[in-house]
Image (cartoon, grey):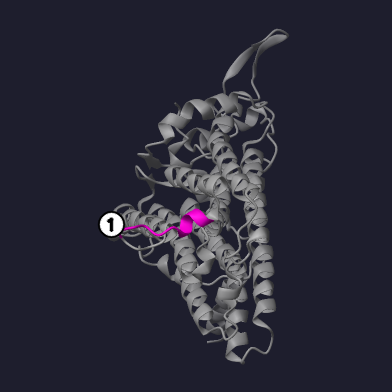
Amino acid sequence: MQSKRQGEGTRTFSLLDRIFNVGPLLSPTQLKRLNEHKYSCQSASILEPFMQKWWNWVVQQLPLWLAPNLITITGLFVNIVTSLILVYYSPDGKQEAPSFAPLLCALGIFIYQTLDAIDGKQARRTGSSSPLGELFDHGCDSLSTVFVALAACLTVGLGAEPWWMFFQCFTGFTLFYCAHWQTYVSGTLRFGKVDVTEAQFGIITLHMITFFFGRDVWEIHFPVLELEIKFIVSILVNALGFYTFCTEYIMIILNGGAGRNGSTIAGTSVISPAIPFAFVVVPAYIIACKSEDHIFEQHPALYILAFGLVAAKVTNRLVVAHMTRSEMEYLDSILLGPLLLFLNQYFNNFFSEYWVLWACLILATWDLTRYCRCVCLEIARHLCIQVFRIVPKPPSATTNSTVVPSAAGPAAPAAHVLTTPIQASSSANGSRNGRHRQK
């Protein structure tokens, strides 16, 4: 009986350790399965083939010492900064920002799209492809989704109708999560004809229209429907998103997974990933509805950022679960921020909701940053690589290495073309939209 209680106590502490990120985040079993991970992607993008010449030209201008992950995070930094400039000038989405703000957002998205597309090409040029690159790429995409969706709503003035803005942003978060949910189920990341690349160009178009004609153009009433243009655009985007949700995601999920007896690749229920994301969306909606200070209506950008970062971490954990073929925990330490907002409302707003929301954002930023840093470092140590540097591997650490003639003697391994079994089987960086494939 005593040993049974000790076993239950050990399991309890183990669960708490995983929830609050105490100790190593990845177990030896997960790291071993990471070695066996093979990237699989199917893409039918309309615009991507036309962009390949541009992406191929850009990557040829880069030095071979430049690490792919450094390219990815540079694009993310540019995207975040340009989006925050728009947030700074229009935090509530009601006041019009200077004309240069939407122009910078459009430029930031294009730069991020380009750098996100060429990081995989750079990885192949330098022989530095790894599972870490795939994880890093998807992690940056999850963050980019938050800022791109928010900036798109601000540029058309959806802040005047905050609940339209709420629905639009969380639709974007949900679609991105579902893309990786069906990957966790089927083992293959799928993109339709109108997907990420097309969505990015669509949002760039919104920013450019605002730049040339001003934000008032979105308030013009469409003559037949008697709706403002911004609402018509929002309806069309959501309709397209719903079509993608049904045809690309839900049908695949409900048809059964690639695991045993139709389970996920980790052997878990195909419906189970819905629970962690529900712990983000449902509290976000309830807290906004129950707020006596109308915290969401008054500070929509701050609210979307806080819960967007929570959604980004849950998505990152789903990607890790997919790549390591492991079960995804339902609870996470980043949910502490939404819990603080809920408890503050329960106790009749003992603290100002505005400052609790700021605390939620700061906590989410710290928790997400810490999680991503720890996971990247653990994987880098396991693979004997560095996150932001290309480290030549010794000949003994490689198999089937390509050799080049050496004027000084026998043929020697070329540092920039060495490949390992992991690298050969996993096109890691720039994996979004099938850009890992040779063109």
Asked where in the image residue 254 lies, by quadrant, the reply is bottom left
Q: Is residue 273 above or below residue 249?
A: below
Q: Which residues are magenta?
A: 216-224
Whether residue 326 appears in this view of the structure is no
**Residue extending farthest top:** 407
Q: Is residue 227 above or below residue 1?
A: above
Q: Residues within 10 Å of mark 1 (few under 14, many from 20)?
A: few
Given residues 102 and 177, the one toward you in this image is 102
Whether residue 278 appears in this view of the structure is yes
How far from the left and from the top, in percent, is residue 337? 62, 74
Residue in view at x 63 percent, y 61 percent = 90
Tell me which amino acid carries mark 1. Answer: Met
- Residue 229 colored in magenta in the image: no
**Residue extending farthest front:** 223
Q: Is residue 416 above or below residue 291?
A: above
Question: In the image, 46: left or right of 394?
Answer: left
Residue topped by disc 1:
251
How far from the left and from the top, in percent, is residue 206? 49, 49
**Residue extending farthest left:** 255
How far from the left and from the top, in percent, is residue 411? 64, 13
Question: In the image, 319: left or right of 78?
Answer: left
Quarter of the image for the C terminus: give it. top left
Q: Which element carries disc 1, helix, strand or loop?
A: helix
**Residue extending farthest bottom:** 348
- Residue 218 colored in magenta in the image: yes
Asked where in the image residue 168 lies, by quadrant, the reply is bottom left
